[in-house]
Amino acid sequence: MRNRVLAWCMAACAALLALGCDRNGNPIQEFGLDKLNKGVSTEADVRGVMGQPDSVREESGERILEYPKGPQGVRTWMFRISADGKLSDYQQVLTDENFDKVQKGMTRDEVRNMLGRPRTVVPFSRKQEEVWDWKYLHVHEERLFNVHFDMQTGKVVRMSISEISGH
């Protein structure tokens, strides 16, 4: 009897854990993503799950739909729709790997296309800098990734990370 109860409890826990995973067994980071299939889902399907995108742009024959979840959220999703109207790929772009790709000399547009709409844009007149930030999750801690642009040239001069106090 004891073994049956233990087996039932383990099966119930496994079922609950599976509810929070996608078809590949990865944790679901955004409600509804499990309903989308690369190569099958259409732009209309993406919009049905994610809603109206913050922006849409054309790049290399694809349409990129951007879904920032800020200012309080820690994710920005980019969905790529191929020329045939099907979902070719999607990713959450606020990652250490993408932050590492931001380099001195990049333009505002290059950074915006890579990371999506910033959470805030703050000018610092004395330093002649404009700082954009994105809230993201580092391990289990919320942080801000900051990109400092020269106000004259509009190009990246440096990057920094800020801790969010109170978390």
Image: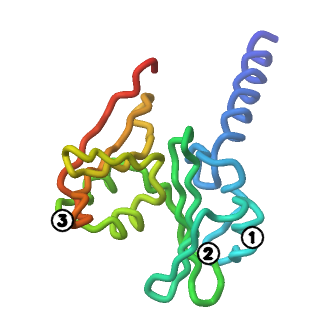
Relative to 120, is 124 on the left or the right? Answer: left
The amino acid beneath tag 1 is Asp
Dot 3 lies on which element?
loop
Cα separation, mark 3 vs mark 1, equals 37 Å
As drawn, the label of residue 105 is 3
Display colour scheme: rainbow
Q: Label 2 near label 1: C-beta < 8 Å?
A: yes
Who comes first in sequence, dot 2 or dot 3?
Answer: 2
Q: Residue, x 37% and y 46% (percent of image)?
A: 122
Q: Residue, x 46% and y 21% (percent of image)?
A: 167
The amino acid beneath tag 2 is Leu
As drawn, the label of residue 45 is 1
Q: Quadrant of residue 137?
A: top left
Relative to 113, is 153 on the left or the right? Answer: left
Who comes first in sequence, dot 1 or dot 2?
Answer: 1
As drawn, the label of residue 87 is 2
The amino acid beneath tag 3 is Gly
Q: Quadrant of residue 106?
A: bottom left
Hey, which residue is sitting farthest front in the picture? 126
